[in-house]
Image (cartoon, helix red, strand yellow):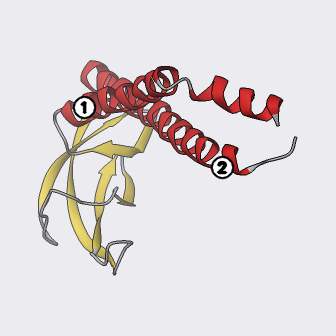
Amino acid sequence: MEINAEMIWPLVVFVLVAAIGILGVVMAIQSYKQLLFYKELNRRGQTVMGKIVRIRTEYGGYDSSDTYYPVFSYQVNGQHYEVEAHPLFFENFTVGQEMPLRFLPESPTEYTWRKTLTFSVILILVGVLLAVGSVAFLYKIDLVSKLFQVSNNG
């Protein structure tokens, strides 16, 4: 298949919109898994007090802002754990701060301090909207048939 000048922009638009759709699907799936984790926590999760022993700082991300990763120390059934959490975006923690951590008995290193799953629900909705919106956009502008029509004619 030979690529001619008429195909470049439709092809670029198709790839970008398809990538956004795939991103939406991945976002929705990951958020749904997080939602299931919270559901299991509510059903059979356990709570332990964790203490922030340090906060690792990653300097200058893609937008030149710093990212903070709290490291929690806690014990479950006599076993000591020191685990780095996911990055902090909207929370402000300090070293020495104690807080309740919720975890599943079979995997005490996977925990959360958050009580709600609102963010997961929002991300599922955004992911679905991106995926559906991408398909609708490609259908509306009839880009796929234009791409194949141009390639068959050229």
Horizontal side, residue 10 vs residue 135: left or right: right
Q: Between marks 2 and 1, how big is the CA–CA gap?
A: 35 Å
Q: Quadrant of the N terminus?
A: top right
Q: Residue at x 44, y 34 (%)?
A: 24
Q: Residues within 10 Å of mark 1 (few under 14, many from 20)?
A: few
Per the image, the residue denoted by label 1 is: 122
Position in image of residue 6 (x %, y %): 67, 45
Q: Residue furthest right?
A: 1
Depth check: give the residue in front, 86 or 54. Answer: 86
Residue type at mark 1 is Ile
Task: Determine whether label 2 and label 1 are within 8 Å by CB.
Answer: no
Residue type at mark 2 is Ile
Horizontal side, residue 136 vs residue 13: left or right: left
107, above or below 5, in the image: above
Q: State which quadrant residue 132 falls in.
A: top left
Depth check: give the residue in front, 38 or 134. Answer: 134
48, above or below 74, in the image: above
Horizontal side, residue 36 vs residue 96: left or right: right
Per the image, the residue denoted by label 2 is: 8
Q: Residue at x 55, y 36 (%)?
A: 18
Position in image of residue 20 (x %, y %): 47, 40
Position in image of residue 146 (x %, y %): 64, 28
Position in image of residue 107 (x %, y %): 45, 39
Badge 1 marks a residue whose secondary structure is helix
